[in-house]
Every structure is written in structure tokens, then in C-alpha cells.
Amino acid sequence: MLDPCWEPRWIREEREPRFNTAPSDDLPAYDCLRLPHNETERDAIHRDFKLCFAASGDIRNLVQTINGLPAGYRGKCDILLNDVDTITVNRNLMILYALLGSGPSIEQSAEMAIHLMYSSALPPAIATYLRGCVRVIYGEGTNEGRLLFRCSLGTRGQGKIYSMQSTMAMRRPMEMFHSTYDLRKGLRSKRTTITDTRHVDDVDRAFASLQPAHRLALAHFRRKGVLAPFSLSTRGFSEPNRLMYTAGGDWLGHAGVNPLKGWNVSDVLATGAKYAVDSADIIGCLFFHVKEELMEFTRRIKEFYIDLHVTQFSPPLLSKGISIGVFPAFAEGCFDRVDTADITDREGIPELLADWGPMLNRNNGRACIIMHSRQWHRNRPNTTAQSNPCSAVMLIERCKKLPSLGNFIIENQTC
């Protein structure tokens, strides 16, 4: 890992890589409002916003967007956080309530949320608190026989966390949250996944872009399963994180798991420097960076008027439900931003625009749909999209034609 000339096995073996997973956390978190470039912070301070994350994945973009609101924000913000995957939705609901509900201090809640998001093992105190959150959110089976689960949860501020989802779809996450397997079984399943030789290229891809010391730090995190500074003892993490395993204790993560992909690494290292963390311990830097982001997010939820609406529907069904008034807080033509993530890879751009174009706020010239694609480059081999494997080769070939760089590249390719 520390060898500066380390290369992925597919390069050493001179073959094409065989990737089995397309990690969902490989884009750094972003602010979907970006007010300095759009409505401007001065104009936005009293403006009401309605935002939709139609395929949210985790809560990182939500956190970044709230943290991008201007200080002293006096408007009201309604945010729809949706995903079709029931485990993702209920995991987000649990994390949000653990973070934003009254109880532990903001700092304690932020550290707890970090482990719920990233650690495969938990201290007994956090595991116990998680069970309490399950009881508060879901009750004791009171939704049995109903088509829809609905709840309204208080936060530290004026706003609330609302949820609406199919009761039938919730069965699997409920079984997860009430499971009884021990940590040993969960970690055995995780180890089987990340050491499976069929996924060796996925693993190497996670390490390929890292400096040697950072590869070592990531390897330590993958082995221990706890996102924390290198010096922290993890002996007290003796309970499984039941948000990360099936009801039978099978790990739900992928072989190439790499939490660094989800955040801007320059910001991560800058935060680590503030806490005097050695830059080599990049996972420790990430711990403090995510902690700062989550604490700021929680403070803003406490100070501002923000309602969160957590739902579990397919995006087309969600847009139709909004159009016919199923969700009282939202209506056709109300959204200032609609973040559709990579929905276009499954439904196509015309279908997406037909579903979500009418949802945009006609009175806001900055209202827009945000989208990205993971598949676009695959059918366009001559393009140079950032994620296109051909782009690196094309760039190297161009640089070889520059006298000042050509010899340097040739020499270093033999390293």
C-alpha cells in the first residue's frame, strides 16, 4: 500500500478491469441551491424555498444544501427527500431523527450520526439509542393493515420531519432494525464481501486514486469498520450497526466501499488541519469534516424554519402524486430545485423532463432540474467525460506531443 509505484491488478496483469459494482457514493456532496451563483444570498434571506431530491440516496446533498443557506435565513424551506429504495429511505429517516431529535447534545448527535452513516459496528450506547429511535418513529406495529405509513417527528427547531411510505415496502427495514444477530456474524459477512476475488478490481479502483498513506488509512478503515481517527480504540464498538446489514446479518455494502469519494477531499484535509490531524490520517480528517458539517446542519435546523418530508416512491409516481395533491406541502409548479440524480440512466431525459419540468417554480427564473449520468459516456467512446476511462488515455497521448512533458510521462510510465 505504501509503495509509490503501486498499481491496480488489472494494470499489472495487462487486462481490462472487471467492475461488478457502480458505487452510489462516488460523487462528492454538493449544494443544489448554490445561492451566490443564482438567487444570491441577499435576495434569498427572506425567500421561501421548496426543494426536491427525487432520488436522494443518502443525506449528504441535503446537508450541504442546508449549510449553504445564508446566515440569519428568515424564510421557510420545505424539502422533499425521496428514494425508491425502502432501506435507503428508512436508513435516512433513522439518521435524521437521531441527529435532529431532542436528546443528546448537537456534538454527541453528530458523532452518533457519523457512525450510523459509515461504521459497521457501534458502541452499546449508540445501539441502545438506535433501538429507542425505532420505537419513537415506528411505534409498536400500529400501522399494521394500513396501506401507507405516516409519521410526524419533532426536531430541535420549528420544523418537523414527516414521512410517508408504503407499509408493505417497510417490512424489510423493520426486520433489519429488530434483528438479533451478533457483531461477529455481521463482520464475517462484510469480510467475505470485501475480500471476494470476484470484486478485486472494485477494491483496487477504491485505492487507485489515493496517495500511499491514504491507501493505508482507507485499508485500516475497511478492516476495522469504524470511521474514526487512526488513534481511536475501537474495542468499545461491540454491536452491529443494524442499518448496514440485512435481518440475517448479511452486509449490504459493496466491495469497493470508500467514504472519501462522498466529500471534497481538499475540504476534508483542510478540516483535519484545523484539528491538528496528520494529513496521512485522511479517515481521521474525514471524521472531523463530516462532524463539522453535521453539527452545522443541526444548528441550522434548530435556528431556521425547515420541514423535511421523507418519502419512498418511484420518481414518476412521486411526480404524479404531487400533481394531484397527495402531498399537502407541495404542488405542481412549486419547486425551486429538483435534483434527479442519475434517473436519466434508467428513464431517459424526455421522460424525466415530462415528469419534472411541470414541477418547477415558474416565478423563479433560477428554478431548474439538476441531473447527472453514470452511463452517458459508455455509448460515446470518443467523448472525454470525467468518468470515461478513455479520457486518461487521450490526455496522456496529448501530453506526449508536448516536448516539455513527453519524456517525463514516458519515464514515469516505467515506474
Image (cartoon, rainbow, N blue to C red):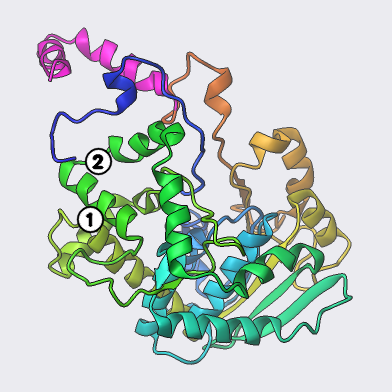
Q: Give left or right: position of 213 versus 367.
A: left
Question: In terms of image quadrants, where is residue 271?
Answer: bottom left
Q: CA distance from mark 1 to mark 2?
A: 10 Å
Image height check: is 5 above or below 162? above
Q: What amino acid type is highlighted by mark number 2?
A: Leu
| Residue 74 visible from this viewpoint | no
CB contact under 8 Å: marks 1 and 2: yes
Q: What amino acid type is highlighted by mark number 1?
A: Ile
Sequence-wise, which precedes: disc 1 or disc 2? 2
Q: Residue furthest bottom?
A: 103
Residue at left 30%, top 20%? 11
Tell me how many marks there are. 2
Main SS, magenta region, reads: helix
The region drawn magenta spans: 388-415
Crowd around label 2: few <14 · some 14–19 · many ≥20 (10 Å): some
Determine which of the numbered discs, if any, sits on residue 199 in the image. Answer: none
Question: In terms of image quadrants, where is residue 82?
Answer: bottom right
* Residue at mark 1: 282
Question: In terms of image quadrants, where is residue 149?
Answer: bottom right
Residue at left 57%, top 74%? 180
How far from the left and from the top, in percent, is residue 139?
71, 86
70 or 298, nearer to the observer: 298
55 or 358, nearer to the observer: 55
How far from the left and from the top, in percent, is residue 177?
61, 73
* Residue at mark 2: 210
Q: Give left or right: position of 360 versus 270.
A: right
